[in-house]
Image (tube, rainbow, N blue to C red):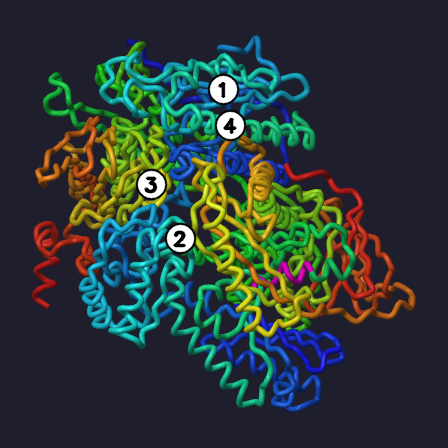
Amino acid sequence: MSTKSAGPDDAGAKRPGTVDPFTMVVLRRRMEAIIREMVNALLKSGRSGVLNTAMDFSCSLTDARFQSVSVALGLPVHVGAIDLIPRKVAEKHGSTLAPGDCFANNSGYHGNTHCADFTLCVPVFYEGRVVFYTIARAHLGDMGFPIPSTYNPAARDVYEEGLMLPCIRVQRDGRDIEDVIDILKANIRAPEQFYGDYLACLAAVRTGEKRLKELCARFGTDLVERFIDEYQDYAELMAKDAISRLPKGRVTRSVRYDSELAQYPDGIPVTATLDVDPDAGRVVIDLTENIDNLPLGINMTESTVLACCRMGTLNVLGPDVPRSAGAFRRIEVRMRDGSAIGRPVFPAATSAATTNLCHLLASHIQALYADLVDGLGSAYGSVGLPGSCPVVSGRDPRRGNRPFVNQIIMGYWGGPAVAGHDGWLTYGSAASQGILWQSSVEIVEQQQPILIEELSIREDSGGAGASQGGPGSRVVFRPRFGPVRFAINAAAHDNPPEGMRGGLPGAPTRISRIAADGTRTDLGITIDVTLGPGERLLSEACGGGGYGTPAERPADRIAADIADGVLTPAHAAKVYPRQAREGSGR
Amino acid sequence: MHERADIAIDVGGTFTDLVLRLASGEIRAYKSPTTTGRIIDGVFDGLAQIAEDLGIPRDRLIAGLGRFAFGTTAATNAILEGKAAATGLIVTRGFRETLLVREGGKADTYNMYLDYPAPYIPRALTLEVDERVNAEGGIERPLEEQSVVAAIDALRAAGVEAVAVSLLWSIANPLHEERVGAIFARHWPEIPVSLGHRVNPCVREYRRTSAVALDASLKPIVARSVADLEERLAASGFCGTLTYVTSSGGQTSAEDIMARPVHLCFSGPAAAPEASRRFAALENIDGGNIITVDMGGTSFDVSIVTDWQIPLHREGSIAGHIFGVPSVEIHTIGAGGGSLARVDRGGFIHTGPESAGSLPGPACYGRGGTRATVTDANLVLGMLDPERFAAGRMTLDAAAARDAVERDVARPLGLVLGEAASLVAVSCEQNMVGAIADLTVKRGIDPRDYLMVAGGAAAALHAVAIARELGIRRILVPRFAGVMSAFGILTGDVAFTFGRALFASSATFDHAAVNGVLEALEAEGNDYLDRMGFADPALRSLVFSAEARYAGQVWQLTVPLPSPRIPDATALAALVEAFHRQHELQYAVRSALDAVEFTEWSLKAVGRLPDVSLAERNMERGAVTPSRRRMARFPSSPEPIDTPVYEIADLPVGVTIAGPALVEDRLTTIVVPPGSRASVTRYGNILIDIASPEGGVT
């Protein structure tokens, strides 16, 4: 069992010389603009729904020392440790890197998040050496799993997951390596959709490459590199300063995740210890007390563990601290090889490493800060994907019975309450923090032969508290013509998102099959079900946990929720008895 | 040439701008304070000011007007301030949250302590009816009329003043929405009702619902304000034509705008690119590629004209509510004279988006503001004259500006005062460069091929610095820079856009169905131009476009149709090729083998108004003598330079002034740094040539 620190950056000594404040301003804006341009290139030319409607992708760049300026514009779980990707490119291919190369990586054993996150990385050459890396990571609609899903929480090992790309070259001299592309197309269910998404990712990394070369030409590589170093010092100072204003303390907290294993009848435990040292300006998160790898796809990866800890902590430190390598130096994460909440040991399955346990850990980090002091952090947000975010597959009789496979992102709500604010409605999980877009009903119905009969707020589902958790959704799907297969990767059925500082938990997730005669069957959390016409899938999603004691919730907020029909008077009387009594006595 | 005078009015947040074209063709500009709450009073104050200037009674001025073209923030402000009518919303059963969910996403990713925004129409006023249409327009569940009647009763009891109807897939089959409209007409005829498929016939229920909700909520107030204006104009003997500026920058009749008030969103600012286009045409600038920037006290607006065309988009929003109808794409960021400068704990400067506004305003205004702003920095740098600010109506407190910049920027960063002030300006300029880069990048264009037109009171202070960063070589500061939008309103065309949803794929193209839609649109457009009084065919034009995408994509691009009908495979191939080109231009890739899908067909009907011309100034050459001099610090020089200051009115046409120089009129200061040259054109505009651009944006 090894314990390794993954926090401090291993960049060499800072390059000499200082950069004036004018250049700092100019280069910071330029770097941010380049990333925005990469995102723009990817968004509107992507093909699968998770890309072009849910925006489930991220773009970033690092220098040759893997230092980022801004990991902005992406999902926290995607970008929090995206530096692992170029590190692996350098480690594995360093001696053969050449201009025009592009590498693909989807392996949790090579620094990637999970199997369905397809990541491209281009080494940017200028004046004969690598100066930058550009990176685009996109969650694809299919990765060639044995089942039509992009997650397989039930996978016992990597061989029950999708095609693995362990940081391999896909382009040389700026041209596709046809054999590699052919392997990909031969293994992925929707090869045209895949190739369209690949081109979209490629457009992003190549756009970034072009702009970075222009930047070096204009400002000189030396100045740009010194800027990156200086910027890390700035980011580190900002993080250190923010930590210095936190209270000193050590908090350990455990929480349970829904178990489908006999080995864990009461749930799978997740434990973390947070040490805040304001004097040293340093945060340590220790995850070494967690269980060994599970025979399930929910094992986390180094990338997702780091991302949860870094981004959760930065959420607490505030929006002014840059999300960059320098800031990460103040956050030390201790994890263990072979742990479900750590680095996986081959051949542990990790295809659900960005959802399930990851959702719980991301919330858990924020909850640790709530334990540390009232007013900080958050309650727990949604854990697992609701039944309204299935990967759907089948054939579409409207289009000549063409096969389809796509993930829908709909009704992915249930934000955790924070001090002074109710949960953010369209939050999804703490791993995505509300960034995902929600599919349009009409676009979903245009792209898949299903009818959505309802998409509404699930009454009484937000956890009660001084601040109330965001409600979950209630969604009903019905196949229109032939059978449609739904693969769903849920959680929070037995362990709904918890409240903090006296707040109550949100309602638990319930996903049911409704037969033609109206009979309802609970489908549990790991679902692979094929429904025919006349049958329905009912998704009742968990709500976020509340923050602060319910007795402190202002009566007018309760009255407004009742008027809007999202809180029933009966439930209000149960969870807010004082306010309900006083309200009716008026 | 013109028998009557025309007037164009742009009601802004602070000032109402008026531009008058006299019967002689002469153009004059005026400003009058906006009277918040009752904006028509400010308009009539302005008219009185003009009448006084002309030495005639106000009513004679009004009675003599041929055209009264009105751009108003009434709609924009009503939405921003939540003062539109109490509105009910009718939706398909099961879908009450459309306006609440919007499309998901979160702009401020890093801030966890935020309240979720409220829907435009509260859930309690959102009522469900029993019905369902599917994606192909088939009826899954017939409309239950009783559920509509029940909703009418509930909305009547709630006291709403307008109703929006937005049912799923009404664009595929409008039958149910039309029936709901008819039931309202029978049961509650006096209530204004807007139907989704008519207001914004696009796929994606949120965009359609948001547009129709805004439209309905604006009907009562727009009807009142139109009636008010018409009444007051009539009382003064007005017998000309009243037009309103629409979101797409064109103008249309009062009747049309009352029927579709959502087209009033961004009514005034939408005309700014039109003004730039006219100035550039007047000055014979080649190419018709223009970036318009407009900077005032709190915000910086950017818009683009490419090949003389003003691009429209469908994603315009106010306070986060998409209004969906075609609108001039204007990108706004919080960068203005009042933008606050601060240094964070890590020693990095930030300028804006927080603004001191005009109250308390910059420290140098002496109105209680103490924090350093961009205006304070410009005063410290010597770019502004403390005695001549805002036409001399205000004296700036230079000591207060120095103190604020010293305390807020210089001391925390260990810089000397002048450097600190420069840094504030550079930081603000970088935000503006970013805004321009985003908009040009989004449209796949290279700003180096563009002319910059700088409008608004503050833009010319920063225009050269911004242009240099972007590699732009020429800047035009128009004579009417302070009233850009009003000038654009005066010179804008009469135009309105009509749209229909019809799905078509290049693989299975139904020529008859598409041509049927195009025919119906053409009839609508022709009716409109007849109604607007354009009899001369030479002044009429019809521009068709389609919303198109590759099969599998869900975002559309707007593609102009190469021909007004698609009769055969050749015409279809030309349309498909036009889409490939557009996609390649914007996203650098084309998928030549993929089918192209079309979701919506639009027609813009345009009635051209006669061109305006500006009076030419005399070409007589005089001596170029600075009116005065002051010490000004340019970024390229460590020390302030003794800089000549010229009055625009004193400058002879054709003379070139080499920087460093400051060129001023009553409302604007134009900064001409070392290396740049400014000249006065024969129309009295200032053209700046940037000698050595620093390359492109990166």
Say which of marks 2 and 1 sits in front: 2
* Local secondary structure at mark 1: helix
| Residue B275 among those drawn in magenta | yes
Q: Residues within 10 Å of mark 3 (few under 14, many from 20)?
A: many
* Local secondary structure at mark 3: helix
Which label number is shown at residue B207? Answer: 2
* Local secondary structure at mark 2: helix
Tell me the quarter of the image containing the N terminus of chain B.
Answer: bottom right
Tell me the quarter of the image containing the C terminus of chain B.
Answer: top right
Say which of marks 1 and 4 sits in front: 4
Q: CA distance from mark 2 to mark 1?
A: 40 Å
Q: Does label 1 lie on the same chain as label 3? A: yes
Q: Does label 4 lie on the same chain as label 3? A: yes
Say which of marks 3 and 1 sits in front: 3
Q: Which chain does the numbered disc 3 sit on?
A: A
The amino acid on which the numbered mark 4 sits, given as a three-letter code, is Leu
Q: Main secondary structure of the magenta part?
A: helix
Where is mark 4, residue-wise?
Answer: A199
In this rendered view, identify the residue nearer to me: B544 or B200.
B544
- Is B263 placed above or below B420 here? below
Picture coordinates of residue A257, whole percent (x, y): 19, 27
- How many marks do you count on the picture? 4
- Mark closest to the chain's N terminus, 1 or 4: 1
Which label number is shown at residue A444? Answer: 3
